Image (cartoon, rainbow, N blue to C red):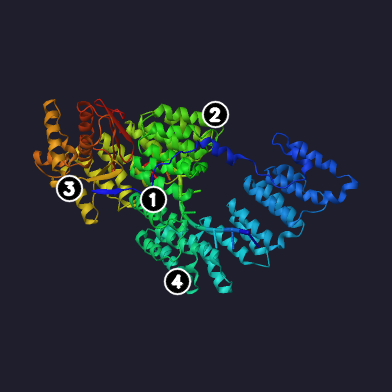
Amino acid sequence: MLFYAFKTLSPASSPKPSSLLFSDLMLPVLSPMPSSHLHLLSPSSPKPLFRSFSSLRTPSQASTSVNNYNHLIQMLCKRGNLKQALDLLPHEPSPTQRTYEALILACVQRNSPGSAAVVHRHLSDDGFDQDPFISTKLVGMYSHFNALDDARKVFDKTSQKTIFLWNALLRALAVGDEGEEALLLFRDMVLVGIELDSCSYSFALKACVALRSCEVSAFERVREIHGHVLRHGFNSRVHVATTLVDCYAKLGCVSYARRLFDRMLARNVVSWSAMIACYAKSNNPFEALKLFEEMMVLEPDIEPNSVTMVSVLQACAGLAALGQGKIVHAYVLRRRLDSILSVVNALITMYVKCGTLVSARRVFDGMNGRRDVVSWNSMISGYGIHGFGTEAIQLYQEMLHDGIAPSTLTFLSILGACSHVKFVQQGKTLFESMIKEHGITPRAEHYACMVDLLGRAGQLDEAIKIIEEMRIEPGPTVWGSLLGACRIHGHVELAERACSHLFELEPMNAGNYVLLADIYAGAKMWEQMINVKKLLETRGLQKVPGCSWIEVNRKMHSFASVDFMDTHTEELHALLVQIVREMKGKGYIPNTDVVLYDLDQDEKEQILLGHSEKLAVAFGLINCRRGEVIRITKNLRLCEDCHSVTKFISKFARREILVRDVNRFHHFRDGVCSCSDYW
DNA sequence: ATAGGGTTAG
């Protein structure tokens, strides 16, 4: 039952205010310039810079101006002033290789495919289209624009194909989700006899992961390349070995990845971070934290970096390990990793998921102008899952006001927020504006949000209309939302319709069968219910066992739902029996409808008492100090009976209880829940 | 000249 106890990290002695560190990073980086022109580089006066250089081109200074032109273009590129740099292109003499390199880089940085075409045309005219160095850069650039055809054209055109050029195209195809194409190219490289380097292997392995659509063959391909790596002695290269670990983990072979990791000869902070990230991503936050602790203990010379800390924070968020998360926060401050945006964003999410919205907001407010769209999305979704719909919408409007363009995820967060508080009209309006004002094409997930919003609010006809009008195939998320709504409103026919799709789309998802059985039970259609349960069994599936956990003094205590009490839970059981007796005196009737077994009333009540959340609440009542919020996390949705019992306890034990279920937070205080019984 | 691991939703 005892999960872990951390001893390795101690709180920071004197954390530095984060704003100081941010300003360090904001200092502009200037490359060498003739000192007489330095004063022209102030950000407010880009134009005088240009004019002043034009005036330099007097006959007496012609020789300096030749160099200075290239220098100037490079300088403008570095400062992101691509337009002015392009204006200088037609001037004689033609730019050098380095100048074109700077121009290509600037096109990538400014995200400007239009400028890229201009640059490409110019360098071709100047004969650089056969320059393998420039071609490599061009392939990288087109890869950035996801213009893989253009990348390939550049590759084909260049007769002198260096390993850099091969690798650049290989990488472009792999990161462009063209795994099949990438692996064909890799095969060509082997056939042609190119001498592969460690980058080639890393990219080829990445390509296998991009094959995800067919995981079996992806696994085979990784094994093949793995064999190749071993035969050519590249397994001792840290990058290659790390990519292998990552690949196997991403294809679902986490334990095999771990074995590889354990056998690695030389491990750096990376390899460690990769393995920690694998656990954090594969829904195994506990293992992630354990491995992090191991790294801190066993490898004193390896210092965790921002990537490590993001994964560790993700793990804390997954576990809702607030105590641990705070220590990690202190460590982040001490190591000054809070200058890294992704780390700060991960901090926001950690506090949100640990139930301390106020701390999340404090971190967010401390970001003074350094917020990106991820920071906003994290905070907006935080308000959403805590049931603060109005605040979520308000923050969304502040975000627009700040000139940050909302992303597809912004709308998933904000629509989710509307759904939690039944803001049907606002949700509809936002969905419309997403399409019309922000030009975002809704994905299946957005439709799923709308179906959830309308369906849960009881507007099932509207929800169906949304599905029927969809221009894309409604995936499992959409039908799943509809099924969830049917459960709330006891709509059997629609549930059957949703399941006819779901059982085909995701036959191994036990949750769908359980929901349908639940809906049949609610309609007292026992025969149908038994049939669904049989179907579940014949497919070899099992209901996901309920599990709740609670952190007390930085130790995690987890509880599985049990059908009978054993010695470990005796004390908790006794407390619950006492509470229920009192509640019954005040009119509480156990909601045995949620028990889908064919048992008599007493037995059903026993099962209700064994629900993991009640055990965790009882444990919290005994072990948490008065005045302290009891924070519980649950792996499934909260059942009705646990919800009403927890409401009761919050009132009569005068305790604040915060429960995070799989969808949202429930804040119980004085007999009421923040979800207003709508969840 | 390329390269490994990470940030938001469900």
Point 40% across, 55% down: residue:
A295
Looking at the image, tell me whether mark 4 or mark 3 is earlier in sequence order.
4
Looking at the image, tell me whether mark 4 or mark 1 is earlier in sequence order.
4
Judge if badges 2 and 3 mark residues of a common chain: yes
* Secondary structure category for the residue under label 2: helix
The residue singled out by tag 3 in the image is A530
Residue type highlighted by circle 3? Ile
Q: Chain of mark 1?
A: A
The reply to whether residue A283 is in sight is no
Residue type highlighted by circle 4? Gly
Looking at the image, tell me whether mark 2 or mark 3 is earlier in sequence order.
2
Looking at the image, tell me whether mark 1 or mark 2 is earlier in sequence order.
1
The residue singled out by tag 1 in the image is A280
In this view, the mark in front (4 or 3): 4
Residues packed near mark 1 inside 10 Å, few (<14), some (14 to 19) or many (20 plus): many
Q: Judge whether A414 appears above or below B4 on screen.
A: above
* Secondary structure category for the residue under label 4: helix
- List x then y, in percent, for residue A430: 46, 31
Q: Is residue A469 left or right of residue A41?
A: left
Marking on residue A401: 2
Residue type highlighted by circle 1? Ala
**To which quarter of the image does residue A565 belong?**
top left
The residue singled out by tag 4 in the image is A227
Badge 1 vs badge 2, beta-carbon distance below 8 Å: no
Q: Chain of mark 3?
A: A
